[in-house]
Image (spheres, rainbow, N blue to C red):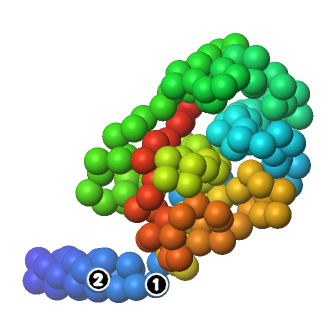
């Protein structure tokens, strides 16, 4: 009986040591997705950043679900989501996919945590918008190890590939400055 008790105590001690040292050995998480190279697009017409960002988000969603994402185009999304002179609609549906705008991020105390949480549930990414710029980009990933958000800007000089959020033309010098300016997001329901 004493031998069994010692063995149980030893096992518990090993489990406790493993639990205490485990987090220091683990790698940080990545939230969101790693889009295919041909998901990215840039603006062909001025002032369509929200439309292009939404198109990339929808293309990535289709890609992740094994659908023909190449068929998701600026023109196709524009027919359902774009109002000339006004911009991207607050809510829109294309086929079975519904997108909604959430302005709550403007009042959020910790926007960084909010965005990480959103990417956890929306790995296809989200459209983020800074009304002060005004400009929208597609945010699709966060790497915990490097504390870096990844996005695709929509303008030709920065667009067409993944970049760290800090390199986007959203207002601000640092990643946190840029996060602080975001006041709207669109995501897939």
Residue at the image position 42 percent from the left and 35 percent from the top: 102
Are the residues tagged 2 and 1 within 8 Å (C-beta)? no
User: Left of 111 or right of it: where is 99?
Assistant: right
Q: Nearer the viewer, residue 115 or 74?
A: 74
User: Callout 1: helix, strand or loop?
Assistant: helix
Q: CA distance from mark 2 to mark 1?
A: 10 Å
User: Left of 85 or right of it: where is 42?
Assistant: right
Residue at the image position 37 percent from the left and 57 percent from the top: 111
Q: Nearer the viewer, residue 37 or 103?
A: 103
Residue 22 is drawn in which quadrant?
bottom left
Query: Is residue 161 among the parts visible in the rendering?
Result: no
Residue of label 2: 20
The spot of residue 189 in percent (x, y) is: 51, 27
Of mark 2 and mark 1, the one earlier in the sequence is: 2
User: Left of 67 or right of it: where is 7?
Assistant: left
**Height in image: 173 above or below 37?**
below
Q: Residue furthest front?
A: 85
Residue at the image position 25 percent from the left and 80 percent from the top: 16
Residue of label 1: 25
Q: Nearer the viewer, residue 57 or 128?
A: 128
Few, some or many C-alpha atoms within 10 Å of disc 2 (few <14, some 14-19, many ≥20)? few
Residue 56 is drawn in which quadrant?
top right
The spot of residue 149 in percent (x, y) is: 56, 65
Residue 97 is drawn in which quadrant?
top right
**Height in image: 79 above or below 105?**
above
Few, some or many C-alpha atoms within 10 Å of disc 1 (few <14, some 14-19, many ≥20)? few
User: Callout 2: helix, strand or loop?
Assistant: helix
The spot of residue 43 in percent (x, y) is: 81, 45
For the N terminus, the quadrant is bottom left
């Amino acid at each position: 009986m004493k031998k069994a008790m010692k063995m149980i105590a030893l096992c518990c001690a090993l489990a406790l040591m493993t639990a205490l040292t485990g987090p220091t050995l683990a790698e940080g998480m990545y939230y969101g997705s790693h889009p295919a190279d041909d998901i990215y697009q840039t603006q062909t017409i001025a002032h369509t950043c929200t439309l292009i960002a939404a198109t990339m988000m929808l293309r990535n969603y289709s890609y992740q679900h094994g659908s023909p994402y190449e068929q998701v185009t600026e023109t196709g999304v524009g027919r359902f989501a774009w109002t000339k002179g006004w911009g991207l609609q607050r809510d829109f549906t294309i086929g079975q996919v519904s997108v909604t705008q959430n302005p709550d991020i403007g009042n959020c105390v910790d926007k960084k945590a909010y965005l990480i949480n959103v990417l956890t549930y929306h790995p296809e990414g989200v459209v983020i918008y800074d009304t002060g710029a005004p400009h929208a980009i597609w945010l699709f990933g966060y790497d915990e190890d490097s504390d870096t958000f990844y996005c695709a800007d929509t303008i030709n000089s920065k667009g067409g590939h993944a970049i760290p959020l800090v390199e986007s033309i959203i207002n601000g010098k640092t990643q946190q400055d840029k996060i602080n300016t975001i006041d709207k997001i669109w995501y897939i329901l």
